[in-house]
Image (cartoon, helix red, strand yellow):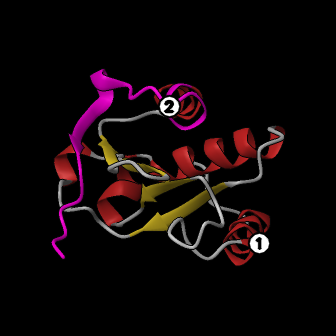
Amino acid sequence: MAKIKPEDLAKIQESMSKTMSLRDGEARARITVHMGTCGIAAGARKLMSTLMASLDERPEKDIILSASGCAGLCSREPMMTVELEGQAPVKYVDLDETKANRILEDHVLSGTVVEEYALAVGSERRG
């Protein structure tokens, strides 16, 4: 399994420092890769590296890529959540690099939810 390199962490830090949040209008999309212990064991690092590379190659600079802890569904890892401005978040499960890139292209860039990989739409938080 590939490990995150210091330059990967530097890219994540740079990406995060450029934006504040979707609500502040700084970006039109946020991709969160769930990287708790279970997610990392299931391959979340590969997803993060793949998405970082894909976003580095794209002209769009208004997409936030971030990491979070466990989402609570260890058996469905690796997982990621996509949030587009003005829309409910979508949680994707059982991912690999190919699926992550498809979600980037179809959902994040084109606005079409990839239903076959989606577990739920909406936030688990109230308030």
State the SS at label 2: loop
Q: Which residue is mark 1?
A: 14
Q: Position of residue 114 (x, y in %)?
A: 38, 25
Q: Mark 1, residues whose alpha carbon is within 10 Å: few (<14), some, or many (≥20)?
A: few
- Residue 4 versus residue 116 in the image, above or below: below
Residue 21 in the image: state x and y as whole percent. Answer: 55, 71
Reply yes or no: does residue 80 show up in magenta: no
Q: Position of residue 84 (x, y in %)?
A: 48, 48
- Choose top left, top right, bottom left or bottom right for residue 57: top right
**80 or 86: which is nearer to us?**
86
Q: Is residue 32 above or below residue 9?
A: above
For badge 1, the amino acid type reads Glu
Amino acid at the residue labelled 2: Gly
Q: CA distance from mark 1 to mark 2?
A: 26 Å
- The residue positioned 15% from the left and 72% from the top of the image is 126
**Viewer-closest of 83 and 79:** 83
Element at badge 1?
helix
Q: Which residues are magenta?
A: 106-127
Label 2 crowding class (10 Å Cα cut-off): few <14, some 14-19, many 20+?
Answer: few
Q: Is residue 91 left or right of residue 57?
A: left
Tell me the residue that label 2 is attached to: 111
User: Please, is residue 77 above or below residue 105 in the view?
Assistant: below
Residue 101 image-quadrant placement: top right
